Amino acid sequence: MGRPHLPMRPAWLCRSCAAPWPCQPARLALTIEFEGHSVALAFYLASSMYEAMDDTLRLGGLPDPAALHARFLGWATRSRRAPPTA
C-alpha cells in the first residue's frame, strides 16, 4: 500500500505526491473516511484551511482566502450538491 496523502506543514503540500493538499487522492480518502458525516468533514476542512492561512502568515506570505476556500472546502461543497433536475 502506498504512503497516505497527508499535508506537509507549513507548506500544505501532500507528503506523498507534493501536490497542494488536499490533493485528489486525499480528497477521495477524506470522502471515504467521513462518509455520512459531511458536516464533520466540512469542520475538519475549515479548520485545516485556517491553519494553512495561519502558516502562510507566519511564513511572511499573504493568504488568498478565496483560493484557499476553493482548495479546502469548494470540492466538498460541490460533491454534496444535488444534480440539477430537468
Image (tube, grey):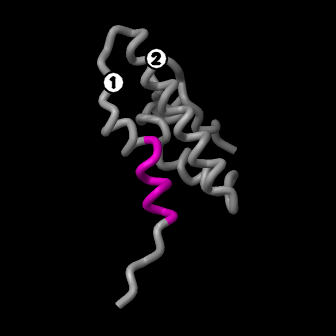
Q: Residue at x 38, y 14 (%)?
A: 57
Mark 2, Cα crowd under 10 Å, few <14 / some 14-19 / many 20+, is some
Is residue 47 covered in magenta? no
Mark 1, Cα crowd under 10 Å, few <14 / some 14-19 / many 20+, is some
| Percent coordinates x, y for residue 65 in the rendering | 34, 33
| Percent coordinates x, y for residue 30 in the rendering | 61, 49
Left-right relation of 1 to 60: right
Q: At numbered mark 1, what does the secondary structure look like: helix, strand or loop?
A: loop
Quadrant housing the N terminus? top right
Q: Nearer the viewer, residue 25 or 41?
A: 41
Amino acid type of the residue that numbered disc 1 sits on in the rendered structure: Pro
* Cα separation between marks 1 and 2: 9 Å
Q: Which mark is residue 63?
A: 1
| Percent coordinates x, y for residue 58 in the rendering | 43, 9
Range covered by the magenta-colored residues = 72-80
Quadrant housing the C terminus? bottom left
Q: Are marks 1 and 2 in contact (CB under 8 Å)?
A: no
In the picture shown, does residue 51 fall above or below 42? above
Amino acid type of the residue that numbered disc 2 sits on in the rendered structure: Asp
Q: Earlier in the sequence, mark 1 or mark 2?
A: 2
- Which image quadrant is residue 66 in? top left
Residue at the far bottom in the pictured view: 86
Q: At numbered mark 2, what does the secondary structure look like: helix, strand or loop?
A: helix
Q: Nearer the viewer, residue 57 or 27?
A: 57
The chief SS type of the magenta part is helix
- Label 2 sits on residue: 55
